[in-house]
Image: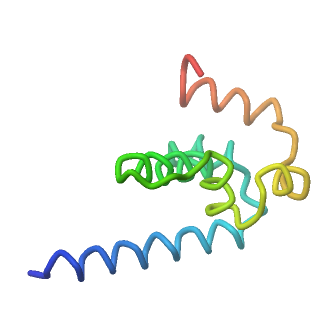
Amino acid sequence: MAMDTTTRTELEAAAFRRLVEHLRERTDVQNIDLMNLAGFCRNCLSNWLKDAADASGVSMSKDESRQAIYGMPYDEWKAKYQRKATPAQLEAMKKAHPGH
């Protein structure tokens, strides 16, 4: 399937926005579970967004990139939705990501 760069970028951006919206709606899914299963989490997405901004010369703080992903300040999201990691989650994290 051939497509021009602009169309590809627009489609990729739409898919990214849909992923972010999905993660905002699924507050029941903890970041540690995402890391254990997929190898990335909401914080990773916010870091990638900031990296892209930095590479493009766009000013974006870590707090701003996290708010763009979480839809609210990170500390507010943590207070509302983040639960304490269980021993099983922590053990899975050690196995999936040794050295972290």
Q: Is residue 80 above or below residue 10?
A: above
| Corner quadrant of residue 72 | bottom right
Q: Position of residue 33 (x, y in %)?
A: 67, 47
Q: At x 73% / y 30%, what residue is drawn?
A: 90
| Corner quadrant of residue 76 | bottom right
11 left or right of 82 in image: left
Q: At x 76% / y 52%, what residue is drawn?
A: 74
Residue closest to the eye, 89 or 82: 82
Q: Quadrant of the N terminus?
A: bottom left
Query: What is the number of callouts on the image?
Result: 0
Q: Is residue 1 above or below residue 35?
A: below
Q: Position of residue 22 (x, y in %)?
A: 62, 72
Q: At x 53% / y 70%, what residue is drawn?
A: 19
Residue closest to the eye, 15 or 48: 48
Q: Is residue 71 above or below residue 99?
A: below
Q: Residue furthest right?
A: 79
Q: At x 29% / y 74%, what residue is drawn?
A: 9
Q: Position of residue 54 (x, y in %)?
A: 43, 46
Q: Quadrant of the C terminus?
A: top right
93 left or right of 53 in image: right
Colour mapping: rainbow
